[in-house]
Image (cartoon, rainbow, N blue to C red):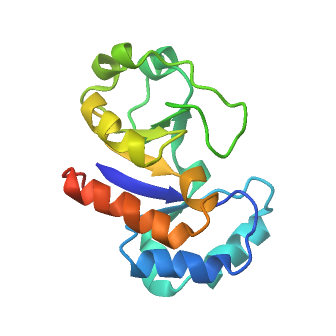
Amino acid sequence: MKLIIISNPTNLADEIKLVSELFENGMALFQINKPDFSEKELENYSLQLPDKYKSKTFLHSDFLKFHSLEELENHKLKYDLAFLSPVFDSISKKGYKSNFNLSEMKEKIKGKNIIALGGIDEDKLEICRQLGFAGVAVCGAIWESKNPLEKFIRIKKICQKTDLVY
Protein backbone atom coordinates (compact mmCIF):
# COMPACT_ATOMS: atom_id res chain seq x y z
CA MET A 1 0.00 0.00 0.00
CA LYS A 2 1.09 3.52 -0.73
CA LEU A 3 1.32 6.04 2.10
CA ILE A 4 0.57 9.55 0.87
CA ILE A 5 0.80 12.58 3.12
CA ILE A 6 -1.45 15.48 2.15
CA SER A 7 -0.43 19.01 3.09
CA ASN A 8 -2.38 21.01 5.60
CA PRO A 9 -4.94 23.05 3.63
CA THR A 10 -3.76 26.30 5.24
CA ASN A 11 -0.20 27.47 5.75
CA LEU A 12 1.58 26.46 8.91
CA ALA A 13 4.59 28.12 10.48
CA ASP A 14 7.79 26.49 9.15
CA GLU A 15 5.73 24.18 6.93
CA ILE A 16 8.36 23.76 4.19
CA LYS A 17 10.95 22.86 6.82
CA LEU A 18 8.57 20.31 8.32
CA VAL A 19 7.72 18.81 4.92
CA SER A 20 11.46 18.46 4.24
CA GLU A 21 11.87 16.68 7.60
CA LEU A 22 9.04 14.30 6.65
CA PHE A 23 10.86 13.50 3.40
CA GLU A 24 14.15 13.02 5.28
CA ASN A 25 12.36 10.54 7.54
CA GLY A 26 10.98 8.44 4.70
CA MET A 27 7.92 10.17 3.26
CA ALA A 28 7.56 8.71 -0.23
CA LEU A 29 4.68 10.78 -1.63
CA PHE A 30 3.45 14.27 -0.76
CA GLN A 31 0.30 15.84 -2.12
CA ILE A 32 -0.07 19.61 -2.02
CA ASN A 33 -3.63 20.58 -1.16
CA LYS A 34 -3.97 24.31 -0.70
CA PRO A 35 -7.52 25.04 -1.94
CA ASP A 36 -7.32 28.78 -1.29
CA PHE A 37 -3.99 29.23 -3.07
CA SER A 38 -3.77 30.84 -6.47
CA GLU A 39 -1.74 29.13 -9.20
CA LYS A 40 1.13 31.51 -8.44
CA GLU A 41 1.01 30.69 -4.71
CA LEU A 42 1.01 26.96 -5.50
CA GLU A 43 4.00 27.46 -7.77
CA ASN A 44 5.86 29.45 -5.09
CA TYR A 45 5.08 26.77 -2.49
CA SER A 46 6.40 24.05 -4.80
CA LEU A 47 9.53 26.03 -5.59
CA GLN A 48 10.41 26.20 -1.89
CA LEU A 49 10.66 22.41 -1.66
CA PRO A 50 14.15 20.95 -2.14
CA ASP A 51 14.70 19.78 -5.74
CA LYS A 52 15.44 16.21 -4.65
CA TYR A 53 11.83 15.82 -3.42
CA LYS A 54 9.96 17.38 -6.34
CA SER A 55 9.51 14.05 -8.14
CA LYS A 56 7.70 12.76 -5.02
CA THR A 57 5.36 15.75 -4.86
CA PHE A 58 2.12 16.31 -6.75
CA LEU A 59 -0.94 18.54 -6.64
CA HIS A 60 -4.28 17.57 -5.16
CA SER A 61 -5.91 18.23 -8.54
CA ASP A 62 -3.67 15.67 -10.30
CA PHE A 63 -5.93 12.74 -9.40
CA LEU A 64 -9.60 11.79 -9.61
CA LYS A 65 -11.60 11.87 -6.36
CA PHE A 66 -14.75 9.82 -5.78
CA HIS A 67 -17.26 10.23 -2.96
CA SER A 68 -19.39 7.14 -3.49
CA LEU A 69 -18.93 3.54 -4.60
CA GLU A 70 -21.51 4.11 -7.35
CA GLU A 71 -19.54 7.05 -8.69
CA LEU A 72 -16.43 4.87 -8.70
CA GLU A 73 -18.19 1.96 -10.45
CA ASN A 74 -19.81 4.17 -13.10
CA HIS A 75 -16.64 6.02 -14.04
CA LYS A 76 -15.70 5.09 -17.60
CA LEU A 77 -12.20 6.55 -17.75
CA LYS A 78 -9.22 4.43 -16.79
CA TYR A 79 -7.07 5.90 -14.03
CA ASP A 80 -3.69 5.18 -12.53
CA LEU A 81 -4.74 6.28 -9.08
CA ALA A 82 -7.96 7.66 -7.59
CA PHE A 83 -9.08 8.70 -4.12
CA LEU A 84 -12.20 7.49 -2.35
CA SER A 85 -13.37 9.72 0.49
CA PRO A 86 -14.30 10.01 3.22
CA VAL A 87 -13.75 6.34 3.99
CA PHE A 88 -13.95 7.17 7.71
CA ASP A 89 -15.18 10.33 9.42
CA SER A 90 -12.75 13.12 8.55
CA ILE A 91 -10.26 14.30 11.15
CA SER A 92 -9.49 17.67 9.55
CA LYS A 93 -12.96 18.54 8.19
CA LYS A 94 -15.24 18.53 11.20
CA GLY A 95 -18.67 17.16 10.38
CA TYR A 96 -17.50 15.48 7.15
CA LYS A 97 -18.87 12.02 7.84
CA SER A 98 -18.38 8.75 6.00
CA ASN A 99 -21.44 7.21 4.40
CA PHE A 100 -19.67 4.03 3.30
CA ASN A 101 -20.64 0.52 4.23
CA LEU A 102 -17.23 -1.06 4.75
CA SER A 103 -18.56 -4.58 4.20
CA GLU A 104 -19.64 -3.60 0.64
CA MET A 105 -16.41 -1.79 -0.11
CA LYS A 106 -13.99 -4.71 -0.47
CA GLU A 107 -15.56 -6.16 -3.64
CA LYS A 108 -16.06 -2.76 -5.26
CA ILE A 109 -12.44 -1.61 -4.94
CA LYS A 110 -10.79 -4.99 -5.50
CA GLY A 111 -8.07 -4.79 -8.16
CA LYS A 112 -8.38 -1.03 -8.57
CA ASN A 113 -5.78 1.58 -7.67
CA ILE A 114 -7.90 3.29 -5.05
CA ILE A 115 -6.45 5.34 -2.18
CA ALA A 116 -8.43 5.60 1.06
CA LEU A 117 -8.86 9.20 2.20
CA GLY A 118 -10.71 10.63 5.15
CA GLY A 119 -10.26 9.79 8.82
CA ILE A 120 -7.06 7.80 8.22
CA ASP A 121 -5.04 7.39 11.40
CA GLU A 122 -2.96 4.69 13.02
CA ASP A 123 -6.01 2.63 13.97
CA LYS A 124 -7.35 2.56 10.40
CA LEU A 125 -4.29 1.30 8.49
CA GLU A 126 -4.91 -2.42 8.95
CA ILE A 127 -8.60 -2.03 8.07
CA CYS A 128 -7.62 -0.27 4.83
CA ARG A 129 -5.20 -3.06 3.99
CA GLN A 130 -7.84 -5.71 4.64
CA LEU A 131 -10.33 -3.85 2.44
CA GLY A 132 -7.86 -3.95 -0.44
CA PHE A 133 -7.00 -0.29 -0.86
CA ALA A 134 -3.88 0.41 -2.93
CA GLY A 135 -2.90 2.97 -0.32
CA VAL A 136 -3.92 5.55 2.23
CA ALA A 137 -3.75 9.33 2.24
CA VAL A 138 -3.20 10.99 5.61
CA CYS A 139 -3.86 14.65 6.36
CA GLY A 140 -5.59 15.56 9.63
CA ALA A 141 -3.88 12.86 11.69
CA ILE A 142 -0.51 14.42 10.83
CA TRP A 143 -1.23 18.14 10.86
CA GLU A 144 -3.56 18.19 13.86
CA SER A 145 -1.15 16.24 16.05
CA LYS A 146 1.07 18.01 18.55
CA ASN A 147 4.14 16.76 16.71
CA PRO A 148 3.53 16.02 13.00
CA LEU A 149 6.96 14.45 12.49
CA GLU A 150 6.55 12.02 15.39
CA LYS A 151 3.02 11.16 14.20
CA PHE A 152 4.31 10.46 10.68
CA ILE A 153 7.07 8.21 12.04
CA ARG A 154 4.51 6.22 14.09
CA ILE A 155 2.24 5.78 11.05
CA LYS A 156 5.19 4.78 8.88
CA LYS A 157 6.31 2.18 11.46
CA ILE A 158 2.83 0.64 11.52
CA CYS A 159 2.91 0.50 7.73
CA GLN A 160 6.26 -1.29 7.89
CA LYS A 161 5.07 -3.75 10.58
CA THR A 162 1.95 -4.66 8.63
CA ASP A 163 3.78 -5.04 5.32
CA LEU A 164 2.24 -1.87 3.95
CA VAL A 165 4.54 -0.46 1.31
CA TYR A 166 5.06 3.28 1.70
Q: Where is residue 34 in the image (x, y as percent from the top left)?
A: 71, 58
Q: Residue furthest front?
A: 146
Q: In this view, does 92 lie above or below 70?
A: below
Q: Where is residue 145 in the image (x, y as percent from the top left)?
A: 60, 60
Q: Quadrant of the C terminus?
A: bottom left
Q: Name the residue rendered at 30%, 55% in the picture.
A: 158
Which residue is more in the foreground, 144 or 14? 144
Q: Where is residue 35 in the image (x, y as percent from the top left)?
A: 74, 53
Which quarter of the figure has residue 59?
A: bottom right
Q: Name the residue rendered at 57%, 70% in the picture.
A: 147
Q: Is residue 115 left or right of residue 163?
A: right
Q: Name the residue rendered at 34%, 36% in the picture.
A: 128
Any part of residue 91 in sight: yes
Q: Is residue 76 above or below residue 58?
A: above
Q: Is residue 34 above or below residue 122?
A: below
Question: What is the total number of numbered labels drawn onto the structure image?
Answer: 0
Q: Is residue 80 left or right of residue 53?
A: left
Which residue is more in the foreground, 75 or 106? 106
Q: In this view, does 25 lie to the left or right of 49?
A: left
Which residue is more in the foreground, 56 or 160? 160
Which quarter of the figure has residue 65?
A: top right
Q: Where is residue 94 in the image (x, y as percent from the top left)?
A: 72, 37
Q: In this view, does 100 lie above or below 89?
A: above
Any part of residue 166 in sight: no
Q: Name the residue rendered at 80%, 62% in the picture.
A: 38
